[in-house]
Amino acid sequence: MRPVRAHRQRAVRSGQCPRRYRRAGVSLLELIAASTILAMTLVPSLRLMRDSLKVSRQLEVRECLTTTAMGALEHQAQQVAAKWQMTSGTDRSYGQLAGYPQVVVGFETSDSPSVGGIKDSLAVVSVLAFEDQNSNGRQDGSESAVRFATKVARLQSYSLEGSGL
């Protein structure tokens, strides 16, 4: 075996060896061309992934806002139906329970005719949920928000159920 190996090494150095013994290599130009093609396909795909993550985050926040606003609306409607007390305020606990401490819920209940209610008969419950990005407690123009409203009639059965009878 030794003489064959020595013969092969001499043939490779002199450039006279058969094709099966030559090393297949890549030239620097081919390497640069392959790297350029790879970069041309990789950069747009990374940009697409970045944009899709951004859209995914926006959808997740809007889903949380919608779910939180509906929960707050149902809670406030239940409170009005049971006790017929008109209130307004803001609350961060709805968002914190959902895992989003930056979500703020503002609610208002009124039976005033100016908002569509009927005094002592029909109340309007309005809820606004928004992502408070700057933590100032107010909705700014750039912050995502969802608003829902409903009306609740004053019925004897609601007040009896709310009082526990």
Image: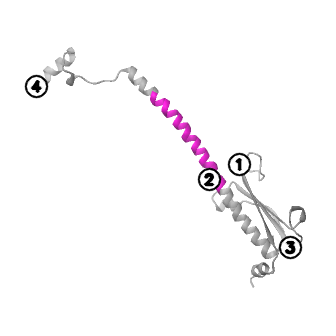
Q: Nearer the viewer, mark 2 or mark 4?
A: 2
Task: Report the side of 45 relative to 3 (left or right).
Answer: right
Q: Quadrant of residue 71?
A: bottom right
Marks 2/4: CA distance?
Answer: 70 Å
Q: Position of residue 144 (x, y in %)?
A: 71, 50
Looking at the image, residue 44 sits to the left or right of residue 159; the answer is left
Mark 1 burial class by Cα count in 10 Å: few <14, some 14-19, many 20+: some
Mark 2 → mark 3, Cα distance in angstroms = 38 Å
Residue under label 3, please give it.
121
Find residue 36 and report its horizontal and vertical position in percent: 46, 26
The answer to which quarter of the image holds residue 161 is bottom right
Instruction: Find out whether the residues at labels 1 and 2 contact each other: C-beta distance under 8 Å.
Output: no
Amino acid type, residue under disc 1 in the picture? Gln
State whether the magenta stretch is mostly helix, strand or loop.
helix
Q: Which residue is mark 2?
A: 60
Q: Quadrant of residue 127?
A: bottom right
Nearer the observer, 155 or 127:
155
- Callout 2 environment at 10 Å: few (<14), some (14 to 19), or many (20+)? few
Which residue position holds label 1? 133
Q: Earlier in the sequence, mark 1 or mark 2?
A: 2
**First in residue order: circle 3 vs circle 1:** 3
Depth-wise, is mark 2 or mark 3 nearer the camera? 3
> What crowding class fits label 3: few (fewer than 14 Cα within 10 Å), some (14-19), or many (20 or more)?
few
Image coords of residue 111 (percent x, y): 86, 68
Residues at discs 3 and 1 in contact (Cβ within 8 Å): no
The residue singled out by tag 4 in the image is 2
Q: CA distance from mark 3 to mark 1?
A: 38 Å
